[in-house]
Image: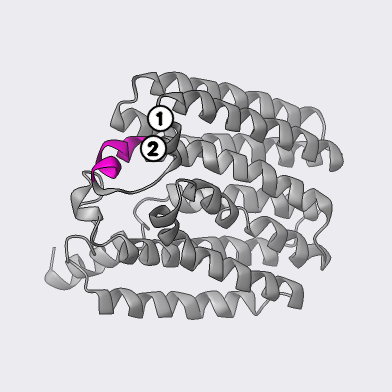
Amino acid sequence: MSEIAEHAWQYVRLMRLDRPIGWLLLMWPTLWALWIAGDGRPDPYLVVIFIAGVIVMRAAGCIVNDYADRDFDPHVERTRDRPLASRAVSTTEAWVLFVVLGLVAVWLVLQLNRLTILLSLAALFIAVTYPFMKRITHLPQFYLGIAFSWGIPMAFSAHLESVPATAWWLLAANLCWTVAYDTLYAMSDRPDDLKVGIKSTAVLFGRHDLLLVSAFYAAFLALLYYTGGRAGLGGYFHLGLVTAAGIAALLVFQCRTRERMTCFRAFVNNSWIGGVVFAGIVLDFLA
């Protein structure tokens, strides 16, 4: 690989484009919202705009996160080779790339209505401030839950020019799901986080970690069931929830050893939960 190609690859890694799990977990709840808000027939143009926005904002968020953690990541086994931590990419390069992504995100959101543009300002604030939450609270996973759920009210406002109660119930459900899967993610880093003083729900929950992860999965599914009822969803949606519950139970069971890579793989496999819920929503509207 040439030097130019190698450096370009470091940019790809900085934006995590080589690891799609981040934008997939952000995309699924956004798609749930688009389909529900669009009564099963979302505007294709909005779907394209939101998917592009998810990928761009996730990439920008990763740059901010790695900048904030550039002095911590070298001490964490899983993150020590990240481009900023390893100095493969300079901080100046990272900020230039962030500005470019930000301009793309601005262009995308300007295609939407006024309310959605206003909501996007809150999304930007949340995305930029999230990486610093792990310094000041053991609950950064809750803040991430808001960040990863904010596409929901934006999707409803883009379709309806309002944000009904159903959107906020769906946001609450997704927040619980985010806390569950990001706690599993944090469990894979817990030994290193304890050494360097990084805070997380995995550290806070301690030996009760899997019990509380299970509780957040249960709250997620209960809130999703309630939200589906408000939206008039039925059999296929409920089948999707049952399947999601089975996957969640399996992931918690697999993590009983608390082994690093097992917890990390469980985090990654949460994308299947988002996918089966989305499939249930789509099939229910088609039925």
What's the residue at 68%, 69% (across, down)?
Answer: 119
> What's the magenta region?
187-195
**Relative height, residue 71 to residue 92 (above, below):** above
Q: Residue at x 32, y 38 (%)?
A: 190
Residue 54 position (above or below residue 202): below
Seen at 34% across and 80% down, the residue is 96
Q: Is residue 187 visible?
A: yes
**Count of numbered badges drawn on the protein:** 2
Question: What is the quadrant of residue 15 in the picture?
Answer: bottom left
Residue at position x 55%, y 70% from top? 124
Image quadrant occupied by the C terminus: top right
Amino acid type of disc 1?
Gly
- Residue 199 lies left or right of residue 6; in this view the side is right
Question: Does 132 appear in magenta?
Answer: no
* Quadrant housing residue 265: top left
The answer to whether residue 251 of the structure is visible from this angle is no
Residue 255 in the image: state x and y as whole percent.
Answer: 40, 24
Disc 2 to disc 1, C-alpha distance:
5 Å
Disc number placed over residue 203 in the picture, else none: 2
Name the one closer to the observer, 50 or 245: 245
Q: Nearer the viewer, residue 135 or 73?
A: 135
Q: Disc 2 vs disc 1: Cβ atoms closer than 8 Å?
A: yes
Q: Determine the image quadrant of residue 106.
A: bottom right
Q: What's the amino acid at mark 2?
A: Val
Question: Where residue 59 sits: x, y (%)?
Answer: 42, 63
Q: Main secondary structure of the magenta part?
A: helix
Q: Which residue is mark 1?
A: 206
- Kind of element beneath mark 2: helix
Answer few, some or many: residues within 10 Å of disc 1's Cα (few below 14, many 20 plus, some between 14 and 19). Answer: few
Left of 72 or right of it: where is 229?
A: right
**Place of residue 125 in the rendered image (x, y in percent of width and height, measured from the top left):** 55, 70
